Amino acid sequence: MNKPSSSVLPHSPVFSWYRSHEGLIFTSGHAAIDVDSYRPVRVGFEEEVRLTLDNLTRTLEHAGSGLDKVLKITAYIVDMKRYPDFNRIYATYFPGENPPARTCVEVRRLPFDFQVEIEAIAHG
């Protein structure tokens, strides 16, 4: 995958897409947004999970890391009944016998009515 240009991930006045400290990368929560327009992408749950993980991938690559360097994931899911669907898709992004440590939390609501939000801690 090509490394995104610096203009793809400008920080906003209220958050940074990621912060680095002593070799670790801490991301903000990611969701299914169009990174060019910053508008939510309205799709079904499974596609939202994919878009969210694609956006997380883009941020990690921009920070000089990647999914293979993720140490910890925190996922917020609005409907835990979708947990098996989430796991099935998640496993395609983190294959193998040693995936990142992970916490999944059911939440009542997410910004812009997203169904999923994911944050990560990775190394560079």
Image (cartoon, rainbow, N blue to C red):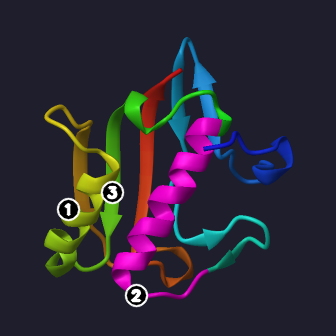
Q: Position of residue 22 (x, y in %)?
A: 55, 11
Residue at figure coordinates x 54%, y 71% from the top left: 32
Q: Earlier in the sequence, mark 3 or mark 2?
A: 2
Q: Earlier in the sequence, mark 3 or mark 1?
A: 3
Q: Secondary structure at mark 3?
A: strand
Query: Image check: 36 left or right of 19?
Result: right
Q: CA distance from mark 2 to mark 1?
A: 15 Å
Q: Position of residue 97 (x, y in %)?
A: 13, 34
Residue 47, placed above or below residue 6: below
Look at mark 1 in the image and give the residue it sits on.
Answer: 87
Residue 59 forms part of the magenta stretch: yes
Asked if labels 1 and 2 touch by Cβ distance under 8 angstroms, the answer is no
Q: Is residue 109 visible?
A: no
Query: Image check: 30 left or right of 8?
Result: left
Circle 3 residues within 10 Å: few <14, some 14–19, many ≥20: some
Amino acid on which disc 3 is placed: Ala
Look at mark 2 in the image and give the residue it sits on.
Answer: 44
Label count reads: 3
Instruction: Work out which quarter of the rendered image holds the N terminus and state it.
Output: top right
Query: Image check: 15 left or right of 56?
Result: right
Q: Position of residue 2 (x, y in %)?
A: 68, 42
Residue 96, placed above or below residue 109: above
Circle 2 residues within 10 Å: few <14, some 14–19, many ≥20: few
